[in-house]
Structure formats: structure tokens, C-alpha cells
Image (cartoon, rainbow, N blue to C red):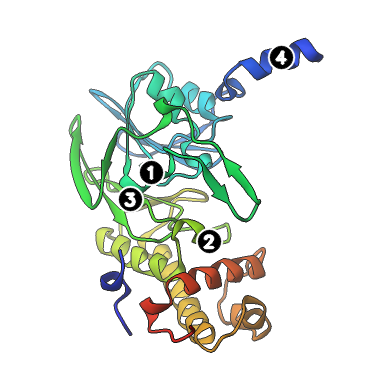
Amino acid sequence: MIDRRHVLKAGLGGLAVLAAAPLWAAETSKLSTQVLAGKVSLIAGAPGNVIALAASDGVVLVDSGSTAMASAVKASLGSAKVKTLFNTHYHADQSGGNELFANDGAVIHAHVITKQWLSSDYYVPADDRWVSAPAKAARPTVSFRDKGEMKAGAERIEYGYLLEAHTRGDIYVYFRDSNVLAVGDVASPLRDPVHDWFAGGWLGGRVDAMDELLALANDKTKIVPAYGPVMTRAQLKDERDMMNVLYERTTDLTDKGRSAKDILEAGVMNEVKRKFDDPYKFLYDVCKGHWAHYTNFGGNIV
């Protein structure tokens, strides 16, 4: 098989007040918080997972939650101030709190492609709608293309690009000393895995990204997806293996001109143990991603 990694990389008054107020003021109650290791904690329900490192020189946050839940994330941190904020990708459920934390002094870090998506209006084909770019304060100010390292207090933090896995701007953030690895939506233990094909995400990229994450992790690493429970390395490998089976089967059928409906009717989704909530939608997005990357798996479908 061609190595994909090398081929790629009230009333009206009340409504008026609500309209004038920032949406991130909507929810201020604290969220469920779990200590993962040392000073690294998991804040759940924002609506996804947010990771917080309570370093001596300020909090490091991985993702900021949705706009509506940002104040709840902030409340969950108590009086601690966020110094550094990483966006694992551009989707609003992970980056909606950017403005709130940036206005409080946080510096936002993200992959350069995520910065681009958050700096302009963009189209969502599944909903047939345009999304306006967030305020300038909500956009990443520090961007990178490959990998980087930094220290926060005594904690060594490594971060790097995961090419075209969920979007084209996915990253991981690895708290090396605490052995906690944030992987965003590249892993999805509960929800159907999502491939934002319009933003360059595809199934081949997801498999490659999972291989990179497995190489980083060890048997004691706590792997945190955007949604769902903390994973072990063995659980991540199980998901990777399932995704690889689906990759092999769907690329073979896509190469033969089969549609998502054809693949579903062929029973491909029954060849893995996991049951998907919406297998047709999953396959539709997978096929759209394959068409965009057909040369990467040696396809001949033009």
C-alpha cells in the first residue's frame, strides 16, 4: 500500500438584552472536573472535553468549549487565569470560548490551517450555510506547521500536526511529564467518527494520525478525545484497527466506483464490531474524502 503520510500531509426587552450580551455568558455553572494526573485535569461537558494544566505560571487549556459553555469552563477553573490556549482544530464546539479567554489574556496556539479557518467566513455544506469568522480576539495568534515544545511550570508540553485526520488543521497536545495526551476529534470512542471532508479530513488521514498517536503513547498514557471517556493506548489501537479495516474496504469499493449507499448495502459496516448511530452519514463523508484524496490510495476513479 502507498504510505499515505508521505503522499500527503421574557419579552422583547429581555431578548434585546440577550442579543446585546456575549453568547459565552449563557452558562456559568461549574462543570464536572476530574484530575487525570498531577496538575492536569479534565473538564467535561463543554460540550466536549477540555484539558487544563494548573501550572505555576498560569493555566494551559486544550480547547475552550463552545461559545455557550465558555463561562462554565472558566467557572470550573476558579480564580486561575488561562495563560495558554491550544485549539485542536477549528470547529466551534472546541474553539467557541476563544474570545472569552483571549480577552482575559490567554495566548491562543493552533495549527496554521486552523488559524486560517478561524480568520475567515467558511461554508458548512452539510447544513448549506455560511459561518461568519469569529471576532479578531478569538483567532489564534501563535501558529505552527509541524511540531513544537514549550514548558509550563515544571511540565514539558509537546504538540504536533496530525495531517488531514478530522480536518486539515488537527493537532495533538502531549503533557509529557503527566503522560496525558489530548487528541481532539481524531479519536472518537463513543460518537461516530467525523471526517470534515470539506476541510480536508479523510479516513486515510485518520488512520495515519492514529499511528502517530500510538507511537507517542505508552501503556500508561491517558489519551483524551474531544468527546467520550479517557482512553488507554490499547483502546486507541482497537479504534485504529477498526478504522483501518474500514479504510481498506471503502477505498477498494470507491476505486470500483461504488457509492456510500452501495458500500452500506454491501454490508461493510457489519464487518466491524462497533455499531454506528448513522452508518450512511459516516460512509457518505468517508466517500467524499476518498474522492478528494483518490491519488493517495492509488485509486483510478477519474
Find the distance from the CA under tag 3 to the CA under tag 2.
17 Å
Tell me which numbered mark, 1 or 3, is placed earlier along the sequence.
Answer: 1
Most extreme residue toward the front is 302
Q: Looking at the picture, which amino acid does disc 2 mark?
A: Pro
Q: Position of residue 46 (x, y in %)?
A: 54, 36
Q: Position of residue 110 (x, y in %)?
A: 33, 42
Contact flag, marks 3 and 4 (Cβ < 8 Å): no
Find the distance from the CA under tag 1 to the CA under tag 4.
32 Å
Instruction: Answer few, some or many: residues within 10 Å of disc 4's Cα (few below 14, many 20 plus, some between 14 and 19).
Output: few
Tell me which numbered mark, 4 or 2, is placed earlier along the sequence.
Answer: 4
Most extreme residue toward the right is 11
How many circles with numbers are drawn on the protein? Answer: 4
On the rendered structure, is 166 left or right of 260?
left
Tell me which numbered mark, 3 or 4, is placed earlier along the sequence.
Answer: 4
Q: Nearer the viewer, residue 91 or 34?
A: 91
Most extreme residue toward the bottom is 256
Q: Looking at the picture, which amino acid does disc 3 mark?
A: Tyr
Q: Nearer the viewer, residue 213 or 144?
A: 144
Tell me which numbered mark, 1 or 4, is placed earlier along the sequence.
Answer: 4
Dot label at residue 16:
4
Find the distance from the CA under tag 1 to the CA under tag 3.
18 Å
Dot label at residue 193:
2
Q: Which residue is mark 1?
A: 116
Q: Looking at the picture, which amino acid does disc 1 mark?
A: Gln
